[in-house]
Image (tube, rainbow, N blue to C red):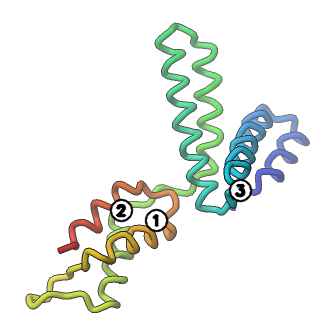
């Protein structure tokens, strides 16, 4: 879990430029918690951080298009610093391995020995895999699971 308060404290002590970036991220976390009483889990932190980094890149691109290189650099730098907090991206082989191991443990095979996931378990497997790999793209997980659904 990202200890944002510790990051802010260290950035403040070091008089780092990244202080404002961490404060902005903390604001995003707090906004999430206030909405409908959400709980800030590690998975939620990663989702929020990933979305926020994407938003920063979009802003940087918009400022680049309008000729504001100063603001483009500011948003790009903030995105770069915050992206370092995200876990390493997960490759498709790791995701597929977890899905096939789970399906194998349930003994979901057809007559030819091919792995088949029953359709009614598809949503649960996607959800479990997404919680195992919070930084993974949900669309990729869904596509992998669909390969085995019959």
Distance Cα–Cα, label 3 vs label 2: 28 Å
Q: Nearer the viewer, mark 3 or mark 1?
A: 3
Residue 95 on image: x %, y %: 38, 68
Viewed as shown, does residue 93 lie left or right of 87?
left
Residue 108 on image: x %, y %: 24, 87
Numbered-mark total: 3
Task: Determine whether the residue tagged by mark 1 lies in a helix, strand or loop.
Answer: helix
Q: Is residue 145 above or below residue 72?
A: below
Residue underneath mark 1: 130
Q: Badge 2, how many Cα within 10 Å: few under 14, some, many 20+?
A: many
Residue underneath mark 2: 141
Residue underneath mark 3: 37
Task: Determine whether the residue tagged by mark 2 lies in a helix, strand or loop.
Answer: helix
Q: Nearer the viewer, mark 3 or mark 2?
A: 3
Do the CB atoms of the residues marked 1 and 2 lie less than 8 Å apart?
yes
Q: Earlier in the sequence, mark 1 or mark 2?
A: 1
Viewed as shown, does residue 23 lie left or right of 111?
right
């Amino acid at each position: 879990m990202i200890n944002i308060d510790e990051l802010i404290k260290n950035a403040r002590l070091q008089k780092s430029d990244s202080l404002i970036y961490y404060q902005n991220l903390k604001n995003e976390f707090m906004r999430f918690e206030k909405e409908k009483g959400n709980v800030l889990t590690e998975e939620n932190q990663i989702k929020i951080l990933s979305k926020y980094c994407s938003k920063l890149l979009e802003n940087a691109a918009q400022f680049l298009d309008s000729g504001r290189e100063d603001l483009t650099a500011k948003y790009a730098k903030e995105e770069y610093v915050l992206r370092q907090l995200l876990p390493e991206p997960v490759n498709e082989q790791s995701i597929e391995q977890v899905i096939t191991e789970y399906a194998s443990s349930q003994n979901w095979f057809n007559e030819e020995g091919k792995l088949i996931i029953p359709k009614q378990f598809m949503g649960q497997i996607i959800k479990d895999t997404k919680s195992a790999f919070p930084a993974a793209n949900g669309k990729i997980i869904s596509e992998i699971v669909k390969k085995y659904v019959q």
